[in-house]
Amino acid sequence: MEPRWLDHARRIQAIAQTGLHYNPARFERERYEKLRDIAAEMVAAGSGADLERVQDLLGQQDGHATPKVDVRGVVFREERVLLVREYLDEGRWTLPGGWAEINESPGDATAREVLEESGWRVRATRLLALYDRRLHGHPANVFHIYKVFIQCELLDAAPVDARGSGASWEETGDATFFAEDGLPQDLSTRRVTRDQLQRFFEMLRNPQLPADFD
């Protein structure tokens, strides 16, 4: 379970961000800005992060506050799943993926992320899960995030050179297919958990299972 202070800080930040979005009067704006500062102080105190960095991060958020969307591609080949090393998380392994972009469908966003992070061209074929990140064993995050896991099929027999497509080669590498009984121990649990991967193997064996949610 996530700490209560983080839940409170998120809600305070959401009130401040949404309030500032609707062009409040001067004194109301000042109150919302103070609320945003309180949320930043709570996050910094609770997590040990630098206060100015947290203030800058929360100050960048604009518009009506809503959850962020993280898409992940679940790509199987011969009952093995594709994982990549996440260099921003000490080289731990994860499903390829990242934030969905504006004007992209979930399937297109997932296919793009898989190509950029692994070099494999894929086509999205099936929604496996739509999870609230808070409820599935991930480490705490300052943002409220929905995680979308989409099964994809390979389009080629070998990966292509995706360096010209905006690939995140400084963030990920070492794309490898793993069997269920050989999953790496050092998973990037900020992005995917062992229970989730095992669930997706189960859905591979039983394609009639419906998508998970919440």
Image: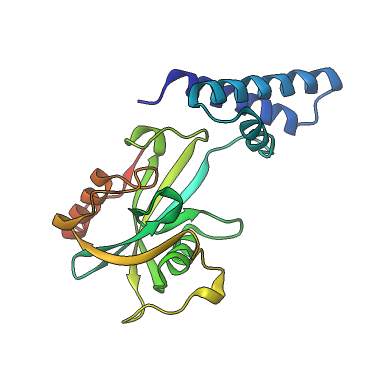
Give the left or right position of residue 106, taking residue 2 as reference: right
**Quarter of the image where one finds residue 42:** top right
Q: Residue at x 68, y 39 (%)?
A: 60
Residue at 44% in and 64% down: 117
In the image, is 14 to the left or to the right of 80?
A: right
Q: Quadrant of the N terminus?
A: top left
Q: Position of residue 20 (x, y in %)?
A: 74, 29
The answer to whether residue 89 is above or below residue 109 is above
Q: Is residue 73 visible?
A: no
Q: Which residue is at a point 35% across and 66% down the rendered structure image?
A: 174
Which of the pair 32/104 is nearer the observer? 32
- Return the residue nearer the eye: 22 or 84: 84
Instruction: Check the image and name the residue furthest to the right.
Output: 26
Residue 128 in picture, x, y percent from top left: 32, 53
Q: Is residue 103 left or right of residue 20?
A: left
Q: Residue at x 73, y 24 (%)?
A: 33
In the image: residue 22, left or right of residue 67: right
| Closer to the camera in the image, 154 or 158 | 158
